[in-house]
Image (cartoon, rainbow, N blue to C red):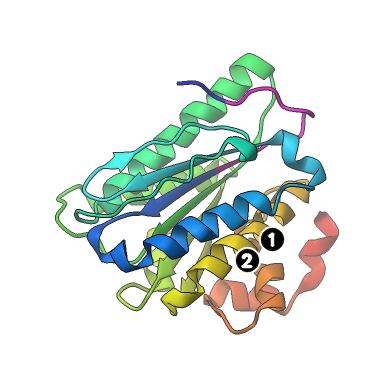
Amino acid sequence: MKNFMDFTSDKVDVFHLVIDRSGSMDGDRDNVVRGLNDYKTSFENFPEKGSIAVAISRFNSSIEFGPFTSIDDMDLHYSTGGGTALYYAITMGAEHLHEYINEIIQTKSIVPKATFIVFSDGHPEGEDYPRDKAVEAINQLNMAGITTVFVAFGGAIESKFGDSMGFESTRDVHNRGDLEHFLGVELSKSCKEQSRSLKGLGANFFSKAVKENSSSGYSGATQQVLEDDSWIDDI
């Protein structure tokens, strides 16, 4: 696996985006592609860009791992079809992130700040992979100080699914028409805040973006942090 390793500082951030590409996402393909492209271009003048690595993995009935690269080299391809092996994607996606973190530690002697973000528009479908394996994978990421995020697209699944799985931060994007804006603007802002922070934002991951776009849905955990700005002092 060819990974982006030429970081411009010792303060490294790693983002693993695990995106649902099951058949039910077919009508959203263009919005997802445009949103990811907007996400990429939003970092053009971002000072910390050279110390960020990102991978986009895509899942349906299985998972296609994306390589960790610079933001400039992000692979934006996206096609749809198949079921929703969500538990398997969570478990294997977490392992993919762990492997890359270990690679950075071994080759650069740097411990990166990492974020694991899963996007889905539906509950697990057509899979028999055990739920408890996925729950344990999220728990291990949380214990390692990695920020875990779950984003629910549409109306077939809600952020409370992510809450029940143990994700630290969860979001609802009920209106599929908001996908492009969410990926290209809100997600971008949250990832930038994460990279500026000295420690992982955890449940506060979406706080600033939600404040600036109050029309989008968010979980109870996010509501609590909106009422307490003290976390900003830690950035």
Q: Is residue 206 above or below residue 136?
A: below
Q: Are marks 1 and 2 in contact (CB under 8 Å)?
A: yes
* 197 on left or right of 108: right
Q: Residue at x 37, y 75 (%)?
A: 154
Rendering coords of residue 192 (x, y %)? 71, 53
**Kind of residue at badge 1:** Lys
Q: Is residue 14 magenta?
A: yes
Pointer 2 local density, CA inside 10 Å: few below 14, some 14–19, many at least 20: many
Rendering coords of residue 77 (x, y %)? 42, 45
Q: For residue 186, which numbered disc appears in the image?
A: 2
Report whether residue 65 is seen.
Answer: yes
Q: Which residue is mark 1?
A: 189
Rendering coords of residue 176 (x, y %)? 42, 75
Q: Is residue 177 magenta?
A: no
Secondary structure at numbered mark 1: helix
- Pick the quarter of the image with the C terminus: bottom right
State which quadrant residue 210 falls in.
Answer: bottom right
* 135 on left or right of 98: left
Secondary structure at numbered mark 2: helix
Q: Which residues are magenta?
A: 4-15
Q: Residue at x 27, y 57 (%)?
A: 22
